[in-house]
Amino acid sequence: MLKEHKYFIFFLAALTGARLLIIPTSLLGVDEAHYALYGLNLDLSYFDHPPLVGWLHGVFLLFLEPSETTFRLPAVILAALTSVLVYIFILKISDHDRRVALYSAIAVNASFIINALGLGLAPDSILFPLTILVIMATVKLEKANTVGNWFVLGLLLGLSGLAKYTAVLFLPPILIYLLLKKRYDLLLTPKLLVGALTALILILPVIIWNIEHDFASFKYQTAHVTGSSAINLGYFFSALATQFGAYSPFLFGIAYYGFWRSLRSKNDYIFLSFLFSATVLIFFGYSSLYKQALPHWTGSFYLLNIALGTYYLWPDQRRISRIILHGGIWLSVAITAFLYLEIGFKMIPFPDYKSPFRDIYGFDRIMAVANQQLTDPQTQGIAICNWTLASRAIYYNHQYPSTVYLIDRRQDQFDYWQKSSPQGKDLLFINTRFNRADIESRMVCAQVEKGDSLDLKLNGRMVNKVDYVWCRNFQGIKE
């Protein structure tokens, strides 16, 4: 059985091996460090996301010490699972054509953001395999109305809800699919309660946490997605342009071709994928009219449709189609391979302060130099004015006895983690070249003093510059 799929197995083993070699070579990025802190501070849920990403880290921390490899290993495993599911999905719709299934898996893994989510754990890393599993489970349920199938669907929907709030977008396409199939019996059967109760029980931790914290997470997510009340077409086109580059310009058109072709498909798996994709596009397309959308928000759309676009282009023998398909995939693979090498070896001497590695380079040294300047961790602390710096500062400070404080007016997860008050302490503020705060004008201090400074260099070029500023007897933020 496995021998039939030897080429896919070889591809998956090679790709997973490459990822395992890459993950120890860089420090944690902004979001990675934030989710690592989830795992180090386990809770029922969190301010900005449901808890599954943190719980998954927590499982690995039962067996492994905190490290870049430990916190990235779940992403590598989930990416391998996603590749297997893409392969199986295309086998199902292509009458078990192993070549097109392999090419589809390669194409998906050639997408830059999908690749990034296979190197660093984020809620989307978990949601990718769950998206395909939910589609498969829905089709199976439509064909066989059993308690077991309802339980499986409820289990998958519950896990999706624990992974990311946008998993609620799974419900409209499932409902529309069943209505279009005229399976009204499935919407009226008592067996539906099995699935609903299963999903509800699984997401209870999120509900309980929000009840205990004045529904803070629900309020934050609502504001996070909706943004302002005025339409801004610039946001929309900016989001589209970002996706064009982030998922690979060579695969962008393949994805939309797959989406367009799947509209008229008679295959249940493909048509349900279309409904899932359309829901994502409509929801986030609408949101991007009011707020700057992040490219990974539409990740499930590109996951499904890069695979489907490959499937639809595969039998087309026209020269232009072959160029688009094979050229698009292999150019993306070549760029991805180059990016892997650059991440691992950091060979290019980028101009001063232009390095793309500034977010994953040097924070261990930044915190080491900060702690060298502290003489009494009881009366002194380290302070940050920006949450993106705070996640890395707190993570790379966990080996020291000092406390890191985020000093700002923004409500976020750090307010729940910060157990002691900085009031009255001597705070050493960290200012980087890219995130600077005028401590004297913003903070109430008995005295402001310059501390040490640190130049971070890579390949002989400046990556970042850090200035440390003392705020003696900190009394708060100025009005």
Image (cartoon, grey):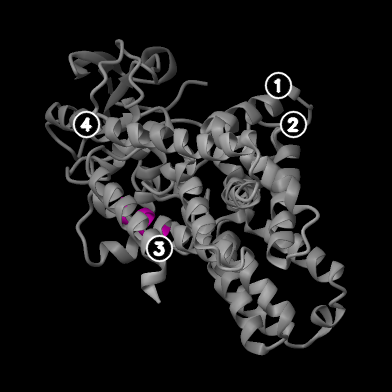
Q: Pick the residue in front: 81 or 331.
A: 331
**Residue in front for this viewpoint, 176 or 195:** 176
- Element type where label 3 sits in the image: helix
Q: Position of residue 238 (x, y in %)?
A: 64, 25
Does residue 296 appear left or right of residue 391 in this picture?
Answer: right
Q: Give me the residue at 36% from left, 54% from top.
A: 11
Alpha carbon distance from label 4 to label 3? 32 Å
Give residue 32's quadrant in the image. Answer: top left
Residue 283 vertical position relative to residue 236 in the rendered view, above or below: below
Mark 3 — residue?
55
- Tell me which residue sits at (43%, 44%) in the image: 115
| Residue 244 locus on image (x, y percent) | 59, 30
Magenta region, residue range: 72-78
> Which callout, 2 or 1, points at the residue further toward the start of the chain?
1
Residue behind mark 4: 345
Instruction: Tell me, yes or no, whether the highlighted magenta stretch contains residue 74.
Output: yes
**Residue 317 or 278: which is nearer the viewer?**
317
Q: Is residue 58 left or right of residue 239?
A: left
Three-letter code, disc 4: Phe
Which one is closest to the eye, mark 2 or mark 4?
4
Mark 2 lies on residue: 289
